[in-house]
Image: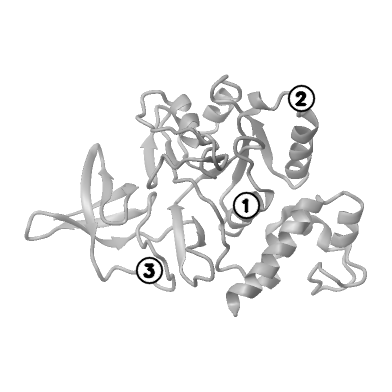
């Protein structure tokens, strides 16, 4: 007997597969690997998989339906293996905080580059906005940086209910990934979107002013509007993989809009004379922090290739 179902939970040792209304606990066949992908986790939340019942009455995943997209990162520093966060996503929402804890802009930019590379529409949720009274200038600067790059930024506060209805409206009938650093409020947000879900939340560690991990593995939850929302473990770093240096600027939308004016067709936007991108940075048309992330990613990739 074989079935085809949706992976809604992946722990690395077992997988929960949704087949109609039935949830089936499966393990993975040892030899199952994806062609051309060196991944620490060959089966992920959002995958459509084929399963069979073995002679012991246990369900085994034996095949994965080709993915239409996924979000991927480097498994660890200097690693050549990848870690796939989730697959078959309609939208990714990255939750960002300017306080308690502070999300590094380079982390945001790396995440957005991956979304661009794998054609996953991305929205930025600026969380804990209720804690930013008196910081209007910093909020405005953040909005300007990412809206000028072409991204929607939504201010939210799970505790005050700010922006929750706007986020809900984007989830109808869609598979949405919610990601970000630990402590930014991903699980709290999901709990506000659908209070019937059993989502664990945690507090901020005072000693390091960082978030405590609450979600330990990715889980996909069906929500009342016919969609699914994927809650992921907090991510500390986001190393890029499978992206060539020469193509990196293609994943910065504001650079794409300007690069056609560069003097040289093969401009790397780092040092060449007549580079329209560098001029746009100098003129404030392209955010310096975004351009700085571009340069840092190029530098990091050189280290990974040694």
Of the two numbered discs 1 and 2 in the rendering, the one whose residue sits closer to the viewer? 2
Query: Is 26 situated above or below 306?
Result: above
On-image quarter of the N terminus:
bottom left
Q: Give the x, y percent position of residue 117.
A: 60, 59
User: Upstream in the sequence, badge 3 or badge 1?
Assistant: 3
User: Going 47% across and 27% down the picture, which residue do you hit?
Assistant: 193
Q: CA distance from mark 2 to mark 3?
A: 50 Å
Is the residue marked by circle 2 packed among few (<14), some (14-19), or many (20+) residues within 10 Å?
Answer: few
Please identify the residue farthest to the top as the structure is shown.
160
Q: Secondary structure at mark 2?
A: loop
> Quick check: marks 3 and 1 in contact, CB under 8 Å?
no
Q: Position of residue 184 (x, y in %)?
A: 55, 37
- Mark 3 and mark 1: Cα distance apart in space: 27 Å
- Name the foreground residue: 123 vs 104: 104
159 vs 9: above or below: above
Picture quarter containing residue 133?
top right
Q: What is the crowding at mark 3: few (fewer than 14 residues within 10 Å), some, or many (at least 20)?
A: some
> Could you tell me which residue is drawn at 65 percent across and 48 percent down?
104
User: Mark 2 sits on what residue?
Assistant: 134
The local crowd at label 1, few if under 14, some if 14 to 19, many if 20 or more residues have their Cα within 10 Å, is some
**Residues at badges 1 and 2 in contact (C-beta under 8 Å)?**
no
**In this view, the mark in front (2 or 3):** 2
Q: State the SS at label 1.
A: helix
Element under disc 3: loop
Which callout, 3 or 1, points to the residue nearer the camera? 1
Disc 1 to disc 2, how far (Cα)? 25 Å
**Image position of 143 with respect to 113: above or below:** above
Would residue 181 appear left or right of 35 to someone viewing this image? right
Q: Earlier in the sequence, mark 2 or mark 3?
A: 3
Q: Nearer the viewer, residue 225 or 43?
A: 43
Mark identifier at residue 107:
1
């Amino acid at each position: 007997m074989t079935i085809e179902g949706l992976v809604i939970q992946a722990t690395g040792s077992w997988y929960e597969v949704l087949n109609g209304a039935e949830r089936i606990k499966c393990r993975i066949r040892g030899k199952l690997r994806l062609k051309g992908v060196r991944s620490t986790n060959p089966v992920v939340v959002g995958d459509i998989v084929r399963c069979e019942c073995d002679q012991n009455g246990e369900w085994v995943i034996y095949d994965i339906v080709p993915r239409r997209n996924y979000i991927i990162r480097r498994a660890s520093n200097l690693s050549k293996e990848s870690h796939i966060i989730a697959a078959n996503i309609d939208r990714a929402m990255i939750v960002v905080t300017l306080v308690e804890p502070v999300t590094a802009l380079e982390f945001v930019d790396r995440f957005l580059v991956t979304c661009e590379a794998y054609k996953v529409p991305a929205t930025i949720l600026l969380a804990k906005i209720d804690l930013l009274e008196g910081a209007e200038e910093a909020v405005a600067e953040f909005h300007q940086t990412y809206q000028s790059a072409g991204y929607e930024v939504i201010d939210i506060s799970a505790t005050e209910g700010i922006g929750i209805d706007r986020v809900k409206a984007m989830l109808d009938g869609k598979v949405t990934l919610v990601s970000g650093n630990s402590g930014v409020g991903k699980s709290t947000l999901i709990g506000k979107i659908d209070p019937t879900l059993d989502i664990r939340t945690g507090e901020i560690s005072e000693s390091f002013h960082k978030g405590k991990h609450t979600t330990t593995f990715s889980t996909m939850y069906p929500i009342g509007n016919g969609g699914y929302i994927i809650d992921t473990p907090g991510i500390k770093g986001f190393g890029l993989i499978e992206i060539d240096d020469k193509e990196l600027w293609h994943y910065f939308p504001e650079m794409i809009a300007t690069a056609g004016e560069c003097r040289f067709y093969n401009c790397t936007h780092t040092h060449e004379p007549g580079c329209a991108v560098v001029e746009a940075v100098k003129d404030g048309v392209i955010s310096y922090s975004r351009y700085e992330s571009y340069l840092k990613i190029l530098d990091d990739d050189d280290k990974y290739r040694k």
